[in-house]
Image (cartoon, coloured by chain):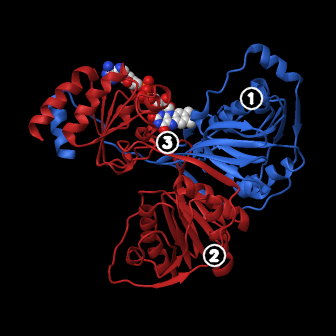
Amino acid sequence: MILIFSDDNETALEILGKGREIADSMKIELGAISFGNEETIFASGADKIYSINIASSSDHIVEVISNLNDQYKPEIILIGGTKLGKEVAPRIAQRSGVGCATDCIDCSIEKGHLIVKRFVLGGRFLETLRLLRKPLIATLLPGKFIKKVDKTRNGEIIKIPYNPVESKVHILEVKKKAPQELKIEEADIIISVGRGLKKKEDIKLIESLAQALGGAVGCSRSIAADLKWLPEERWVGLSGHKVKPKLYIAIGISGQVQHIAGIRDAKTIIAINNDPNAPIFKACDYGIVGDLYEIVPKLTEKLKKQV
Amino acid sequence: MPEIIVCLKQIFDLGQIRVDTSTKCPLTEGVARKLSDFDKNALEEALRIKEKHSGKVIAIIYGTKDAAKEALAMGADEAFIYQYTEEIDHLGIAAILAGSIQQLKYDLILCGEASIDEYSFQTGPRLAQVLGIPVLTYARKIELNDGEIIVERELENRYEVSKTKLPALVTVTKEINQPRIPTLLQILGASKKSITEMSPMKQEVGVKILSILAVEMKRKEVIVKEIDELAKVILSEK
Ligand SMILES: Cc1cc2nc3c(=O)[nH]c(=O)nc-3n(C[C@H](O)[C@H](O)[C@H](O)COP(=O)(O)OP(=O)(O)OC[C@H]3O[C@@H](n4cnc5c(N)ncnc54)[C@H](O)[C@@H]3O)c2cc1C
């Protein structure tokens, strides 16, 4: 069996798509630990649902999945690579004395082995790994895999008795991030800004362009982490958010490898920068050399007229 | 007085790694090495806790003596180093770390959330699992008080303030602090501190690396001259 879990419902459905493909090629079952709507889970590919009240405590999730592993001995455990997923997967692997690969962008079966691919060394290299012993555990990058829905599918629900483990960690407070901080991963158009911006108020320029195009505003690490002009949700790159828009416009961003690592999957990249030697011009599809303070307002006006 | 252990990894300076044009493999010969960025945040946090509560900071480093000197110059009291020439993965690293830590007294273990070369996020959670102690990941704020630790964690859509009893393991993000740069005096002073070389036993591996190859990035790299032209491109690509 392949066992699927993610604390994020969307990610879980995406992984079910990949899981279904592998399960078919190995002729084994696909099981999902219940998360939300059961019909959707079956439609997305699961044969079985292990229904349990998953608490959000990672201690509990580690316990539940480890117990399912002991009982059902799945060949493969695929976990959504959310922050929580990347914490629980290695813990489950360590308990079972096996390896684990995180943030995989691809996984496949070759001659009965699970082969995964992930970025390393600042996103400039792709590592291919083979997991050696069962259960083969990997976390898959959210937003990377495609859901497949077949509403005629159905399956079996297995209720798992609820034995809450006492979590060693007590959550005192949860502060939701502000709602305007929309998930940048989901944006089709991203207008991103970097250190080329002189002051915080000038973000207005970028926002107007984003508005004209119906896009989201993103930024480099400097803008989010050092200057704190935009929230971290907008931070694109290796250590920020990895995005995959149709159109990415980098404004006043030099294009260091760590930033580029976050936009590899963008379909088209456009750069606006006043330094003709900026590395971004070697990593974009279209570029214009010039002062953003001159280009951005004019561009916004033109686009407003035509959109 | 808290005894704090910080786990650090020495990595290649990623910016200096070049690509072998024929094999597409990374070329690391002669590339400078340094402590991984977030691990330094972990060390910095340990030093700040020590400044507030006194106690002791021990660095356990996967790397060379140079890496130990860097950590000692920043302010660690003592360093343990280990190197490993055979194949190793996170399963083995966690076992080696746990083996040495079990012989030490500790209240708190700090790790970077991930190393910047591999970005696996595995070492901290695995180590806590072997030691059977609570783990709090992605910390951007830590407060120690009376045998307990309160941590503000950053998750995708929320911040979570959590509490647990010591001993515990915490992995930190780079937002937690700005690591100090040691002064010349501290660098010289570090030479008097103790560095112990460990010799880890052979470890079992759980994954095998088949290849590490440069990612081909093919972009058009077209430079346009006029804003009008740029607008046209944008409208056709959106
Ligand atoms: C471990 C690690 C992880 C990292 N992760 C990330 C990450 O996830 N995301 C990220 O972005 N960075 C990351 N970085 C940082 C990265 O290396 C760069 O420092 C950062 O991306 C630079 O941001 P920037 O392009 O905004 O600023 P700069 O590099 O300062 O570039 C500013 C650019 O603006 C241009 N400019 C200036 N004025 C104007 C003007 N008037 N008009 C037009 N252009 C102008 C300049 O020519 C320059 O190219 C990471 C670094 C490390 C070490």
Question: Residue A191 in the image: x percent, y percent?
Answer: 30, 37
- Can you identify the residue that label 2 sits on? A68
- Can you identify the residue that label 3 sits on? A238
For this rendering, which residue is in front, B124 or A261? B124
Task: Say above or below: A306 vs A144.
Answer: above
Question: Residue A12 in the image: x percent, y percent?
Answer: 46, 65
Q: CA distance from mark 2 to mark 1?
A: 41 Å
In front: label 3 or label 1: 1
> Which chain is painted in red?
A
Element at label 2: helix
Contact? badges 2 and 1 (CB < 8 Å): no
Question: Residue A226 in the image: x percent, y percent?
Answer: 49, 27
Residue B111 visible in rendering: no
Q: CA distance from mark 3 to mark 2?
A: 33 Å
Output the chain of dot 3: A
Q: Are marks 2 and 1 on the same chain?
A: no
Contact? badges 3 and 1 (CB < 8 Å): no
Q: Residue at x 28, y 27 (%)?
A: A204
Write down the colour of chain B: blue
- Can you identify the residue that label 1 sits on? B47
